[in-house]
Amino acid sequence: MGVEAVAVSAAVRNGRLSAARRLRSRARLIGTAPGASVRSNFVFALVLSALAAGATTLGSLVGLWVGRPGPRFMAASLGFSAGVMMLVSFGELLRESIAGIGFLPAMLAFFGGMGIMFLVDALVPHEFISEHSLPPGPGFCPGDAPGHEHRHGRRHGMGLPPHQLLRTGLMIALGIGIHNLPEGMATFAGAIKSRGLGLAIASAIALHNIPEGLAVAVPVFCATGSWRKAVSWSSLSGAAELVGALLAAAVLAPFLTPTFLNYVLATVGGLMVFISFDELIPGSYAYGHEHHSVAGIVGGMALMAASIWLLR
């Protein structure tokens, strides 16, 4: 019995040591101390996701109360967001993933992320930023504005009757909400890796959430005449980003190992590159100021590169 008791006691101690080692390993993975600091990093990631989601509401408020920014500003800002996303994806996320799990696994995860966003975009298409270029204001919603044809071959115009405008706004909100789910996961995963990386991803996503908020608010406002309803629906579409972060937290928490996180980071890189190529860059060029678009892309890359260098 004495020998058995000693063996049991040793096993318990070994189990505790093993658990402590796992905790320290996870803490080192996310750059924090064990215990409360690990929890604070999770909280920081969720707060960042909430702030990025709030940019959708900000976009609706800016558009309805101040007026839409000019085309040069929109071309440069969307290009800037794309530049930040691409530099972070190639220069940080994919590089870290290759160093951690090897070239082929990282590439498979990277292109897998692009495939996920392609499927989401194909199954739940949403209105593109460049398709909502008219600002609300006097004469914007009476029904006499001409329509315009966009790249999908359909025609849109603010001459639609109110019930169709409302349906358009709600469908845009639904589509943007579903697209925001993986973006929330991307912000959360980046913040878990490092706070600086999380801030960079959240900033890029927030920049392109602002015009998406306007895209939801304009048709709802024109259909109902209610700023409250327009802002509410815009906020709901943005809230999906926080839901995505919460889902990521629920999935990541039990499996937070260096190998798993490196797969996630490569996948997030693929998500952000697809968003840049599919929406941000075409949306930026659609404003007709190509030099501002290119300047924004280069500026976003340069600023992100400087930030990564300074944070090292």
Image (cartoon, rainbow, N blue to C red):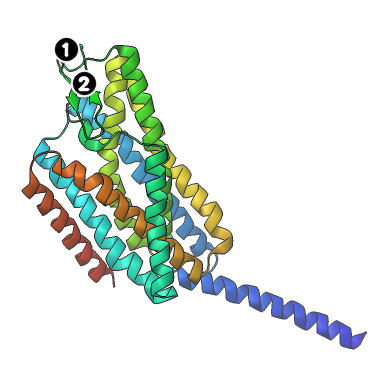
Percent coordinates x, y for residue 90 in the rendering: 28, 65
The residue lying furthest to the right in this view is 1
Residue 272 visible in image: yes
> Between 281 and 240, which is closer to the camera in this rendering?
281
Residue 174: percent from the left, percent from the top?
A: 41, 32
Seen in the picture, residue 126 relative to 28 is either above or below; the reply is: above
Decide if residue 295 is on the left or right side of residue 184: left
Categorize mark 1 by other alpha carbons within 10 Å: few (<14), some (14-19), many (20+).
few
Residue at the spot 26% in from the left edge and 15% down from the top edge: 160
Q: Secondary structure at mark 2?
A: loop
Give coordinates of residue 177: x percent, y percent: 40, 37
Q: Amino acid at mark 1?
A: Asp
Mark carried by residue 245: none
Q: How many discs appear?
A: 2
| Gap between marks 2 and 1 measured at Cα | 9 Å
Q: Disc 1 marks which residue? A: 144
Task: Note whether residue 190 is visible.
Answer: no
Question: Considering the image in quadrants, where does the N terminus appear?
Answer: bottom right
Identify the residue at image location x=53%, y=74%: 25
Viewer-nearest residue: 150 or 253: 150
Q: Which mark is residue 157?
A: 2
67 left or right of 238 in image: left
Frontmost residue, 18 versus 37: 18
Most distant residue in the front direction: 153
Query: In which quadrant is the C terminus drawn?
Result: bottom left
* Residue type indicated by callout 2: Gly
Contact (Cβ within 8 Å) of mark 2 with mark 1? no
Q: Earlier in the sequence, mark 2 or mark 1?
A: 1
Q: Position of residue 148 (x, y in %)?
A: 17, 25
- Vertical position of residue 118 compared to residue 269: above or below: above
Query: Does 281 appear above or below 165?
Result: below
Q: Secondary structure at mark 1?
A: loop
